[in-house]
Image (cartoon, rainbow, N blue to C red):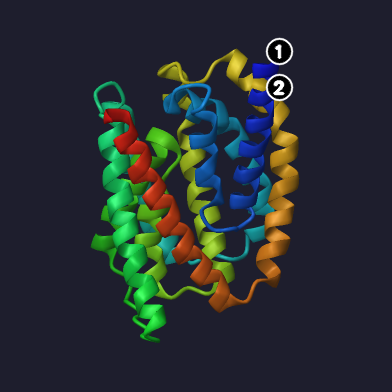
Amino acid sequence: MQNDIIFWFVAILAAISVGLGKGGLPVVAALAVPGLSLFMSPIAAAGLLLPVYIASDIFALIFYRKDYDYEVLKIGIIGMTIGVLIGWATAQIVIEWVVTVLIGLMGSTYAIRQILLEMLSVKKIQPLSQKKGTFWCIIAGFTSFISHNGGPPWQIFVLPIGLSKSVYVGTSVIAFSYVNAIKIFPYYFLGQMNINTVKIASLLILPASVAVYLGYRLVKIIPEKLFFNIVSWALLLISLKLIWDGFQVIL
């Protein structure tokens, strides 16, 4: 009974973190799968949370439906589609901890660079690159399929472009809403989603949905410069956590 109480406590916190992330708070949603991984495998946790992500996406799309960059979104959808297909094709053979560590290393390296540039007051806006964008979005789609951790590679692509706060959040919301939608069939056929996981997920949708609104309101009042500083530091912390999680498997 105690384990059930602890599980539901962690599951509700995971749902809230998904909602806050979908509301626009940087990288918060990436905490959800690691939390539930205390009770099940990361792959099972990803399958259980997918309906929660999709429900949160619906509410987030309502708030951010007018805030997006079409060109970034076009690149994102193409690359992420390829990444999800690669994830589906390799789901049975991929070594999850290797992927986790690599994404952590890439994300932390980029985050440290961004933080140093900000400290030195160096503004380095890069033009939109289709080749670079497609590459990072393929990685984002792949890692999102494996463990809902597509945030770090997506941010490596999007942050240097210099989008405004609302457009950055809106474009991210739409891109990952699309990715989560196309993961439904692969997850089902791989056995990561079933009636039992959907029943559990349905009970987590309410706290996640409320958290979407809370996240949306918080993003509105956070100054733009502070917002992107939070994004960079959150990316660094999550990336270091990914490295730690990956090496824990082999220690």
Judge whether residue 166 can be spotted in this image.
yes
At x 60%, y 43%, the residue is 18
Q: Quadrant of the N terminus?
A: top right
> Residue 147's quadrant in the figure?
top left
Q: Is residue 138 visible?
A: no
The residue where tag 2 is placed is 5
User: Which residue appears farthest toward the front when viewing the image?
Assistant: 251
Q: How crowded is the residue under tag 1: few (<14 C-alpha within 10 Å), some, or many (20+)?
A: few
- What mark, if any, has residue 198 been given in the picture? none
x and y, in percent, of residue 36 in the image: 54, 30
Residue at 50%, 57% in the rendered image: 172
* Amino acid on which disc 1 is placed: Met
Three-letter code, disc 2: Ile
In this rendering, position of residue 19 left or right of residue 232: right
The residue sitting at 61% across, 45% down in the picture is 17
Callouts 1 and 2 close, C-beta under 8 Å:
yes
